[in-house]
Image (cartoon, rainbow, N blue to C red):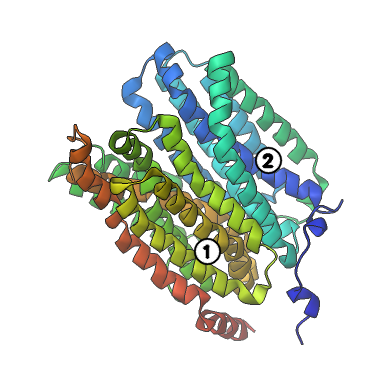
Amino acid sequence: MADPAAHSRVAWSELLTREHAPALALVCLGVWLHAADGLVVATMLPAIVAEIGGGAMVAWSVALYEIGSIVAGATGGFLALRYGLRLPMTLAGALFALGCLVSALAPTMPVLLAGRLLQGLGGGGLVALSFVAVSLLFPPRLMARAMAAISALWGVSSFLGPLIGGVFVEAATWRAGFVFFAVQALALALWIGLAARLGARPPATGVSSPMPVARLTVLAAGIVSIAWAGIDIDPVATPAFVAAGGVLLIVFLVLDRGAGADRLLPPGPFGLVTAHGSALAMVLAMSAATIAITAYGPLLVVAIHGVSAIVAGYLVACSAVGWTVFAILVSGSDPRHDPRYIAVGMAMVVASIIGFAVAVPAGPVWLIALVAAIEGGGFGIAWTFILRRVTKLSDPAETERVSGALPTVQRLGYALGAAYIGIIANAAGFAEAETAEALLPAARWVFLGSLPLALVGLVAMARFVSPGVARARRTVSMGMD
């Protein structure tokens, strides 16, 4: 019989005990560094360009950070399996700090971009390993509360990031902003190195090969190729870059599948047969489908509705507020209701894409904010329970890989979705538009063009929440027995 306690509501006080509070604070600080960094740097970029130049390379400050995050995140589960949590998380914190210091001392934009790449490697590693830490350091009944706390911190980061960046630009210097985050990262690295609980689980003995540099290089090259395709639309070059990037990503998956115990991703990472396959496919598709509001929302809202840049930025931040509020509201739910909440959340996300296609070109501004809150709320409702359900239904030997893959696949979806939406936007005339009226077609199509991706996500979600995926897990387990 099932344990009745397993289905009781979990109080926040259980998460804040002496046993669990330090682990919660540790993973939240790791997520904070990654979540706040991007918005802080975006706020400081005008001052950076004014001092050291390199305006033509501004876009790569985001691209290189994302690539570093994806590459590091892809290795999170692998490193946790091979070395445990303490060493990889300590190195990730130190790498983030080094990247901040390189950027703080940068005399030119290329040097700053090198620092951004290091920050992406450290920040992506911290986030992926924080998800692994949640799955290992907290009992299943507390996972949803821990994920809700992380979601709340992410929402806070979305509002504090621009504020912190603005304070350093106005009251000090952008270089001090990078130093501020370097100090935090060094403190985190020291704390992790001394955290006894992170050494509680020994590394797996079956993982013995060196860092898979070749696979990571292929992965990064595939992402860069697809991202490059959206910069300048050309009837020959754009399809060629997309095709090349797709081939490289397939090669990466084939190489990874053949790596045995040293795989970076769980077996069959994208598919409808297993729980983790359908979950990762859902996360990839939904992340790609929703990046349009982040990539183009502020520019479109400023140009079409005449609001200030900071108002447009905080309109997008409403998504983080919705994510945080809804994640906290449902975090104590009975695990038996996980499929229902995941389905409702993903349906809200798809509805928000349609809402953006109407509200961004037509307004009013408050409606855009409401739709953003709905989108974030959908992710907040679903994301709180995705980790718990996929951990429950996946092979225990793949826990580190699956939990570490979730944030990595999310970043991969953002990167690939941005490249895809960039092609659609430029094909709809975004780059040539000089008036608000000329921007209206692009304002519609960047969101309508995202719907096919969202529909793929809905199909994967339906499989993930179905009883059949649980029966498949039991069948596999009995076969192994």
Q: Indicate the amino acid at tag 2.
A: Leu
The residue carrying pointer 1 sits among few (fewer than 14), some (14 to 19) or many (20 or more) residues within 10 Å by Cα, namely: many
Q: Residue at x 34, y 50 (%)?
A: 359
Q: Nearer the viewer, residue 57 or 102?
A: 57
Residue 44, numbered label: none
State if disc 1 and disc 2 touch (CB < 8 Å).
Answer: no
- Left or right of 149, for residue 377: left
Q: Is residue 469 above or below residue 398?
A: below
The residue singled out by tag 1 in the image is: 266
Q: Is residue 421 above or below residue 457?
A: above
Residue 214 visible in the shown view: no
Q: Indicate the amino acid at tag 1.
A: Pro
Alpha carbons under labels 2 and 1: distance apart: 27 Å
Mark toward the viewer: 2 or 1? 2
Q: Residue at x 45, y 75 (%)?
A: 462
- Left or right of 194, for residue 301: left
Q: Residue at x 73, y 44 (%)?
A: 26
Task: Report which quarter residue 101 is drawn in.
Answer: top right
Q: Nearer the viewer, residue 445 or 22?
A: 445
Q: Residue furthest left?
A: 235
The residue singled out by tag 2 in the image is: 29
